[in-house]
Amino acid sequence: MSRDDVNLLLQDLKEERLLCERNFEGLDVEAYLDKRDEAPFADEWMKAYERYAGDSAVAEDEVLRQIREIAFKRTISLTGEPELAGYVSDDFGLIGCYLLQDGEQDAFVNRLYEGYVKE
């Protein structure tokens, strides 16, 4: 994982290979947000955030800012749901921070990313 992986994530968002209509088809937004706020998801998400994005220098990287902004704006345009857009933006920020780390694989962050990859 490297800067190249983060740049590829940004490119995939810009070219709409990630976050398109099929990501949100049939989504019960209220139920989805409620589920995210409950354990174990919320606990795992916070642990991953503290591990990868807790360093403000990493989290404030310009490419990560662009990733979060695109994720937020695209989600708003597709769903009209600002709270959902905030969660999606946070997810992509976490995924980007994770990609910048030279650490071991993280099953939770990988599953989080895979949830957005829709063939």
Image (cartoon, grey):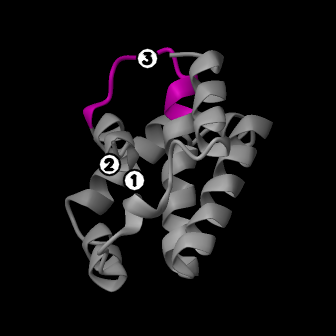
Q: Quadrant of residue 9?
A: top right
Instruction: Kindly identify which residue carries mark 2.
Output: 115
**Residue under the point 53% across and 48% down:** 92
**Dot 2 and dot 1 residues touching (CB under 8 Å):** no
Counting residues from the start of the chain, the first of labels 3 and 1 encountered is: 1
Given residues 81 and 50, the one toward you in this image is 81
Disc 2 marks which amino acid? Answer: Gly
Identify the element where label 1 is drawn.
helix
Q: Position of residue 64 (x, y in %)?
A: 68, 41
In the picture provided, is 59 more to the left or to the right than 12? right
**Residue under the point 36% across and 80% down:** 29
Q: Which residues are magenta?
A: 97-107
Quarter of the picture holding the C terminus: top left
Q: CA distance from mark 3 to mark 1?
A: 18 Å
Instruction: Kindly identify which residue carries mark 1.
Output: 46
Q: Position of residue 32 (x, y in %)?
A: 30, 74
